[in-house]
């Protein structure tokens, strides 16, 4: 089985804050991490290889420093890494991102399963996985919480739904997006860390993947950001302290009065 | 260089502060862009009070916009029943259609679903497109996407809305690619720009710290998903009817699928269906031990609610992941959210801050949860929660 794992480097959003006094972004100490959902994608890719053989290639589109995310994936056990990096990719929305990744995957050619995270925590769109499978014209299964069986040309998985789950079978190749419940990601091994240091990472530009310049980056993006603003603050609530019995009586009284309960 | 700084720049640093990526710095009273960091996100352009920044890129256009008319809502169904998110979208769609002076249409794919059209009219639809086929009984990514794409290409709606559910989030991205247009996920606000007629799609970004308004200005339809319980459904008007359009010209190829459903399993524990619950009682690390969640279950039982948890509580193994509220868990919007022993980290807040009424119980008066709470009780959960249960039992006579 040849597995491709798509990962994204994202700012750890805990650190992106608005300074309420100046109404500006506080960036100090913003760390870049591998999108947490993609850690499950990496882990699942490695587990499939451990069971069925083959190799795991990890791929990301991003600025040059996204190389760090790839090296982290290699330290966990991925075999190869591809970095799509080019100024021409800047400003890509999910349409243009999926297109670029699908063109890189066409260049890699040899794959059975593509695994993405459920969503990236910076945009939370969950659109890039389905976008890639549509551009490649392959089937997709989103919200996968368990892989039940893999045989040549066949996969059976459990897909999370609002009510429970659905068991789904598909032909290969297929694209999966995975949720947190699927596994418990491992820690990097010493061997992995050494490999991550020395591995030659392929760096591809828009020209290398044969991308149509009109379909990538900002020019290729059907959506644009029109305005960015701070969410309106919720009006200050009522703080109650003191004797528990008294507070609760008062609270329940008010909740009843306002027909909240 | 696609982000241009012109001579109007006075070096005021407003752009430097607005940049989420630390890509602009003022050097000798002039903004300088670090191309390795700039993602062309556009945050700096409106931040500049002097019109000194321009993103100068010619973007690919596609649709002849005037050919596209009407607002469509994807009427997601399960087991033949239209899901409530579709009715909420009709509520939002009605306003948009009225502003655009156009029709509001629902699109219903399924098996034996024609009986559902009446409810769609009652909740605001003028027209319902129905594709009723045995193969469409349950959601399947490929046939649903191919058929919706064909309908979009044939009838050319201006706007297409869908729920940000597990189905909507799998389906609509596929349709957006097939239909060659943009898609904005998880919108919390939808409005029409009076000047251009474009759909203003507002959504949280960076874990809810920032709001962004997104446009699909050159392509049609403008597609957006919205989470359950974000928009309000209209009160049903049972006198309303409309036109049912039975779509029958569907090719066998459009119905084919490379994935197949082997089994559907519903695990409806009544306490887990968090996103549907009117009241949620949530616990965090302040509960200290798994057995203490009993206390929350008792309170939830009294008010007919569900039990939620913070990630810290889930990671400690006190509650299953299906109960987690927040950025990496579920987004909920109940009438009442009671946060017990939860500090209120931003990743938790983004999952619950749009609840109608938030009650927080925490012994730390400085806990950030109090900044979103309507009622903030500074106190010990082990004292307050049992009191609350007793008192509510009393007044609700249970
Ligand atoms: C990428 C990422 C994604 C994340 N996603 C999520 C998510 O989806 N959901 C989520 O919840 N978190 C998420 N987190 C974690 C989040 O940052 C916090 O760590 C977490 O929400 C904290 O949980 P807590 O409030 O239960 O615990 P704590 O922060 O430890 O707070 C416990 C609170 O209980 C109070 N307390 C203690 N004892 C008592 C008592 N006897 N009576 C009353 N109050 C008491 C304390 O004062 C404290 O405020 C995420 C983090 C990251 C980095
Ligand atoms: N720039 C990128 N490079 C590689 N993979 C990506 C990129 N953006 C998104 N993905 C993948 O698509 C998933 C969903 O991302 P999103 O649609 O942005 O929420 C992520 O979990 C990744 O697996």
Image: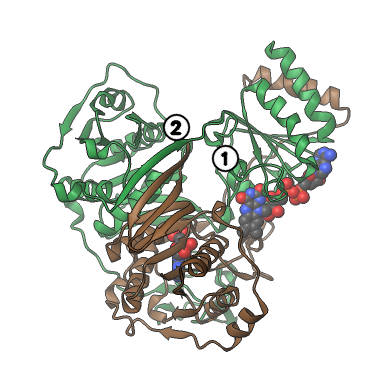
Chain colours: A brown, B green
Q: Residue at x 23, y 32 (%)?
A: B128
The disc label shown at residue B239, or none: none
In the foreground, B67 or A63? A63
Which numbered circle lies on residue B232?
2
In this picture, is B105 found above or below B252? Answer: above
Dot placed on the residue nearer the N-terminal end, 1 or 2: 2
Which residue does the numbered mark 1 point to in the structure image? B354
Measured as percent of width and height from the top left, residue B168 is found at 38, 45
For the residues beneath circles 1 and 2, the answer to whether they share a chain is yes
Q: Considering the image in quadrants, where does the C terminus of chain B appear?
A: top right
User: Mark 1, chain letter?
Assistant: B
**Left or right: B136, with B85 as reference point:** left
Q: Secondary structure at mark 2?
A: loop
Ligand 1 is within 8 Å of the C-beta of the residue at disc 2 = no
Estimate the spatial distance between the alpha carbons at disc 1 and disc 2, rounded to whole Å. Answer: 13 Å
- Residue lying at 27% horizontally and 41% vertically, measured from the top left: B71
Taking depth in this image into account, of B6 and A12 the one nearest to the observer is: A12
Which residue is depicted at the point 39% across and 53% down?
A141
Residue B5 appears in the picture as rendered: no
């Amino acid at each position: 089985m040849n597995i491709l794992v798509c990962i994204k480097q994202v700012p750890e959003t805990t650190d992106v804050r608005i300074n309420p006094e100046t109404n500006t972004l506080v960036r100090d100490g913003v760390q870049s991490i591998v999108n947490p959902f993609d850690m499950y994608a990496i882990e699942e890719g490695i587990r499939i290889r451990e069971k069925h053989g083959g190799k795991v290639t990890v791929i990301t589109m991003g600025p040059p420093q996204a190389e760090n995310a790839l090296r982290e994936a290699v330290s966990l056990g991925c075999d190869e890494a591809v970095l799509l990096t080019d100024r021409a990719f800047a400003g890509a929305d999910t349409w243009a991102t999926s297109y670029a990744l699908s063109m890189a995957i066409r260049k890699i050619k040899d794959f059975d399963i593509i695994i993405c995270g459920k969503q990236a925590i910076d945009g939370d769109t969950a659109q890039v996985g389905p976008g890639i499978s549509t551009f490649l014209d392959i089937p997709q299964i989103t919200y996968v919480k368990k892989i039940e069986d893999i045989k040549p040309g066949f996969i059976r998985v459990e897909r999370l739904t609002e009510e429970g789950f659905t068991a789904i079978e598909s032909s290969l190749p297929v694209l999966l997006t995975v949720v947190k419940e699927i596994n418990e990601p491992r820690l990097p091994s010493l061997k992995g860390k050494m490999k991550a240091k020395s591995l030659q990472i392929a760096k591809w530009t828009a020209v290398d993947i044969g991308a149509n310049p009109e379909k990538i980056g900002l020019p290729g993006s059907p959506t644009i950001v029109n305005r960015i603003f701070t969410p309106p603050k919720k009006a200050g609530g009522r703080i109650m302290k003191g004797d528990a019995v008294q507070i609760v009586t008062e609270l329940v009284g008010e909740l009843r009065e306002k027909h909240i309960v | 260089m696609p982000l241009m700084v012109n001579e109007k720049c006075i070096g005021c640093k407003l752009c430097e502060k607005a940049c989420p990526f630390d890509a602009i710095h003022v050097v000798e009273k002039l903004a300088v862009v670090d191309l390795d960091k700039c993602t062309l996100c556009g945050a700096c352009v409106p931040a500049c009070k002097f019109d000194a920044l321009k993103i100068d890129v010619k973007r690919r256009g596609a649709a002849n916009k005037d050919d596209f008319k009407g607002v469509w809502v994807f009427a997601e169904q399960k087991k033949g029943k239209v899901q409530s998110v579709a009715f909420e979208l009709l509520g939002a769609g009605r306003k948009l259609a009225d502003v655009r002076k156009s029709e509001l249409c629902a699109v219903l794919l399924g098996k034996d679903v024609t009986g559902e059209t009446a409810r769609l009219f009652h909740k605001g639809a003028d027209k319902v497109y129905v594709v009723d086929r045995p193969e469409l009984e349950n959601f399947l990514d490929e046939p649903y996407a191919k058929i919706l794409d064909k309908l979009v290409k044939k009838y050319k709606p201006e706007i297409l809305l869908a729920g940000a559910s597990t189905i909507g989030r799998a389906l609509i991205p596929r349709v957006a690619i097939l239909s060659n247009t943009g898609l904005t996920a998880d919108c919390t606000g939808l409005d029409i720009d009076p000047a251009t007629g474009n759909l203003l799609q507002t959504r949280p970004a960076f874990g809810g710290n920032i709001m962004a308004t997104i446009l699909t200005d050159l392509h049609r339809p403008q597609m957006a998903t919205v989470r359950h319980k974000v928009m309000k459904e209209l009160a049903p008007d049972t006198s309303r009817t409309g036109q049912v359009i039975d779509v029958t010209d569907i090719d066998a190829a459009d119905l084919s699928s490379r994935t197949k459903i082997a089994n559907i399993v519903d695990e409806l524990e009544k306490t887990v269906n968090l996103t549907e619950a009117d009241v949620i009682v949530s616990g965090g690390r302040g509960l200290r031990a798994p057995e203490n969640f009993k206390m929350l279950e008792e309170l939830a039982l009294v008010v007919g609610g569900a039990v939620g948890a913070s990630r810290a509580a889930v990671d400690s193994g006190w509650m299953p992941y299906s109960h987690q509220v927040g950025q990496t868990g579920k987004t909920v919007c109940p009438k009442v959210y009671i946060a017990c022993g939860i500090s209120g980290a931003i990743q938790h807040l983004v999952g619950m801050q749009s609840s109608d009424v938030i009650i927080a119980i925490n012994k730390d008066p400085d806990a950030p949860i109090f900044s979103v709470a309507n009622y903030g009780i500074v106190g010990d959960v082990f004292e307050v929660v049992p009191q609350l249960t007793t008192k509510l039992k009393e007044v609700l006579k249970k």
